[in-house]
Image (spheres, helix red, strand yellow):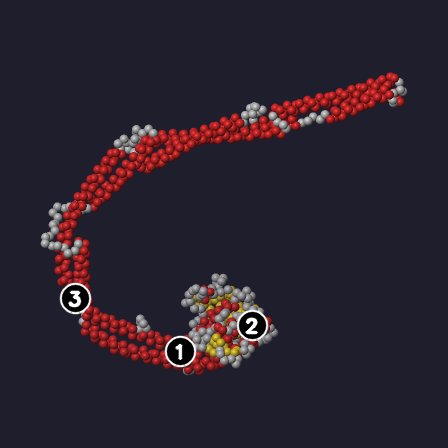
């Protein structure tokens, strides 16, 4: 069979087409490019979709997994050549079943292919059922391993024996085991059921004997118990008479206690309300707390009075210390400014050095002029006349007089300035101007201290006034409250005594009421004596106290009731169980049937042993050929490193290296070598179990993904050679296969795009 064209609306494939050729087709596509979808589409076109599958954890059923992403109906077309004739297959949905409708026509004629239906299409074209196809010619993505299936076992058995595929070893084994389980299964088997029925019959016969014995024993014990119960009843009557007398005494005592408690309550209520009804206990306790607080306020007031007197004295002392005759009525800042000005004045010394220098210069010039005039040494312009000499002498005398005047003025000014400085220093009692500033600073500090002590005095006096107000308010409130039930109270001691007395009366009254309530409840709970109560019978002395007598009476009555019930049950069971002879007859019948069923079980066990032996012989006849073929293929795929393959009955493959002695399980091999091992097994199974007159295409989805480049090339060489016998569809996500086959005419490379 050769597939030419596939067109699909299937999963992510939206009306896409895949054109194939005979031989090896390498179909390259990236991840999510549709490779696995095309593989599933090919299988669904042949075998349809199992609509009974349901989604479960980690698995999505095909009918849901491959619903077209576009929302269009699931449908597809496949054109192929089968047995030399071209056929077109069309699948679509029918009655909600995806791919449930199949149209198979001869290509170009639209004539139906006789006998080809949706149910038998795949098995007819492939020559094998779906489970054989999936375990041989169809290698899904990441699923090169192979497992057993009844159809595959049946086909292998047919090839090794008579050629019939209707049953397999596992099917026959299962049926024989089912027959054996029908006889020996723990719950539903025939043998356990017969054994159970036999046990029931034995139990019934034993129960009949036991019931007869129990009925007789119960009758004798009942006679003894009834006599004991009659005697205990008489003793209980004695106890009841005595108890009635005691109850009467307790009732009368309780009534007397209730009357006494009521009298006490009445007396306390009269004392409490003698001058008026006091408030509730909560209010009284609150008033007591206020009284305690008032005492605290009074103590604080006395303390505040002492503190106020002390603050007043400190303020007066500070105010006296802050008075200075040098700064009368001045603020600290004003005093500081005055002292600062006086200190500056006291420290200032007028500068008379210029006047002294000018006077001395004028005096020197005048004296020099006078000397020149006297000596006749005059300048040339004067001509040396007497008049000139006199004028020069007068001018020199004037200059000398001016110099003397300046000297005298400077001297007098210096003396007056020194006098003013000494006067200021004497007024402050200071030696230096800095002493004046120290006097002002001391005045300022004493003023600050006086102001602080005055503030403290005002604060203490304010607190004293507040405490006095609180004391008066609290005292007035407490007097107002206490006067409602103690009008004669006038002071704090009376308030305290009145509140304490009221609380004490309330507590005593509450306690008395509790006693009254308890006495009343006790009196009400006791039964009233009834006239005509029965007296205790004479001549009977109880053996036990009342409780034990009643307990013994109840126990005897309970035991008698149990014995009556046991006697009735025993008699009822005897009546229900029926004739013992009938049970004995049935027991013999069961023993005979048990013997027969156990013989059948032994026969089925022998049959299973024989079946296992026969299957072993079939495996011995078929397995060597399958192992040989798989070994040859594995040798080609691994370059001769592994040349021997062993396949167990469960289709677990083992491989041995060329010349090796011990085969290795697939789990001990690398992933790539394990894939090569199972690919070889699948190809060998294809060769053994699938028809070879019109070979079905081989579908490989990423089967070479784990092969290294070297073994990938060996696999491609083998698949290219195998492609001369059957069509091969190799899906891959790598470009190395296309690169390896570039330029070869015996392989087609097809590239799909995501």
Mark earlier in primary sequence (2, 3): 3
Q: CA distance from mark 2 to mark 3?
A: 92 Å
Mark earlier in primary sequence (2, 1): 1
Mark earlier in primary sequence (3, 1): 1
For label 1, the residue is 169
Farthest residue to the left: give it.
539
Quadrant in which residue 62 is drawn? bottom left
Specify few, some or many for label 3: CA neighbours under 10 Å numbering under 14, 14-19, or 20 or more: some
Q: Position of residue 753 (x, y in %)?
A: 56, 66
- Mark carried by residue 217: 3
- Residue visible at 44% across and 82% down in the picture: 621
Side of 251 where 111 appears, left or right: right
For label 2, the residue is 708
Q: Position of residue 167 (x, y in %)?
A: 39, 78
Which element carries disc 3, helix, strand or loop?
A: helix
Specify few, some or many for label 1: CA neighbours under 10 Å numbering under 14, 14-19, or 20 or more: some
Q: Position of residue 92 (x, y in %)?
A: 46, 67
């Amino acid at each position: 069979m050769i597939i030419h064209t596939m067109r699909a609306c299937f999963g992510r494939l939206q009306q896409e087409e895949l054109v194939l050729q005979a031989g090896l087709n390498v179909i390259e596509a990236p991840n999510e490019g549709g490779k696995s979808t095309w593989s599933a589409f090919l299988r669904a076109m042949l075998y349809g979709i199992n609509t009974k599958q349901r989604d479960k954890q980690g698995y999505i059923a095909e009918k849901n997994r491959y619903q077209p992403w576009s929302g269009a109906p699931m449908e597809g077309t496949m054109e192929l050549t089968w047995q030399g004739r071209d056929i077109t297959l069309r699948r679509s949905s029918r009655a909600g079943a995806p791919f449930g409708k199949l149209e198979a026509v001869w290509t170009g004629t639209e004539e139906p292919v006789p006998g080809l239906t949706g149910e038998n299409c795949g098995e007819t074209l492939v020559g094998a059922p779906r489970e054989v196809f999936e375990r041989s010619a169809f290698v899904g993505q990441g699923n090169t391993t192979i497992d057993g299936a009844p159809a595959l076992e049946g086909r292998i058995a047919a090839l090794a024996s008579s050629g019939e595929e209707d049953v397999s070893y596992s099917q026959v084994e299962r049926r024989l085991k089912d027959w054996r389980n029908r006889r020996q299964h723990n719950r539903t088997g025939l043998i356990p059921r017969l054994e159970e029925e036999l046990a029931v019959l034995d139990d019934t016969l034993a129960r009949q004997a036991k019931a007869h014995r129990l009925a007789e024993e119960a009758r004798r014990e009942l006679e003894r118990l009834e006599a004991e119960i009659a005697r205990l009843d008489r003793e209980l009557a004695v106890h009841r008479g005595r108890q009635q007398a005691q109850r009467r005494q307790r009732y009368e005592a309780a009534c007397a206690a209730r009357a006494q408690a009521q009298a006490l309550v009445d007396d306390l209520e009269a004392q409490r309300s003698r001058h008026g009804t006091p408030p509730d206990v909560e209010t009284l306790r609150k008033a007591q707390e206020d009284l305690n607080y008032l005492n605290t306020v009074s103590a604080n007031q006395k303390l505040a009075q002492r503190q106020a007197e002390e603050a007043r004295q400190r303020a007066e002392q500070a105010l006296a210390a802050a008075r200075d005759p040098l700064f009368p009525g001045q603020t600290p800042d004003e005093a500081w400014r005055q002292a600062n000005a006086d200190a500056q004045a006291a420290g200032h010394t007028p500068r008379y050095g210029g006047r002294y220098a000018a006077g001395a210069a004028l005096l020197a010039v005048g004296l020099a002029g006078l000397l020149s005039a006297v000596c006749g040494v005059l300048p040339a312009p004067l001509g040396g006349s007497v008049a000139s000499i006199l004028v020069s002498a007068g001018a020199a005398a004037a200059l000398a007089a001016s110099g003397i005047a300046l000297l005298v003025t400077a001297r007098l000014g210096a003396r007056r300035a020194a006098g003013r400085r000494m006067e200021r220093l004497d007024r402050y009692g200071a030696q230096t101007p800095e002493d004046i500033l120290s006097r002002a600073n001391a005045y300022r500090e004493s003023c600050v201290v006086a102001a602080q002590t005055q503030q403290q005095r005002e604060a203490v006096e304010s607190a004293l006034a507040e405490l006095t107000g609180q004391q008066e308010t609290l005292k007035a409130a407490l007097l107002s409250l206490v006067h409602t039930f103690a009008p004669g109270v006038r002071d704090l001691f009376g308030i305290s005594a009145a509140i304490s007395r009221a609380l004490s009366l309330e507590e005593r009254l509450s306690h008395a009421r509790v006693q009254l309530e308890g006495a009343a409840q006790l009196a009400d709970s006791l039964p009233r004596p009834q006239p005509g109560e029965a007296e205790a019978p004479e001549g009977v002395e109880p053996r036990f106290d009342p409780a034990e007598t009643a307990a013994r009476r109840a126990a005897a009555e309970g035991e008698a009731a149990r014995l009556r019930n046991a006697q009735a049950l025993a008699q009822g069971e005897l009546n229900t169980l029926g004739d013992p002879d009938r049970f004995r007859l049935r027991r013999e019948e069961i023993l005979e049937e048990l013997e027969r069923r156990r013989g059948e079980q032994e026969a089925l066990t022998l049959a299973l042993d024989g079946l296992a032996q026969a299957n072993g012989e079939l495996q011995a006849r078929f397995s060597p050929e399958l192992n040989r073929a798989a070994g040859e293929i594995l040798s080609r795929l691994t370059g001769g490193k592994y040349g021997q393959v062993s396949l167990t009955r469960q289709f677990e493959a083992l491989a041995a290296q060329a010349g090796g002695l011990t085969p290795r399980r697939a789990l001990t091999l690398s992933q790539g070598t394990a894939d090569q091992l199972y690919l070889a097994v699948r190809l060998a199974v294809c060769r053994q179990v699938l028809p070879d007159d019109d070979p079905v295409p081989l579908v490989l989805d990423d089967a070479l993904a784990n092969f290294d480049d070297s073994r990938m090339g060996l696999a491609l060489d083998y698949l290219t050679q195998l492609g001369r016998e059957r069509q091969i569809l190799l899906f891959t996500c790598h470009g190395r296969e296309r690169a390896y086959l570039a330029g070869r005419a015996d392989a087609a490379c097809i590239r799909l795009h995501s």
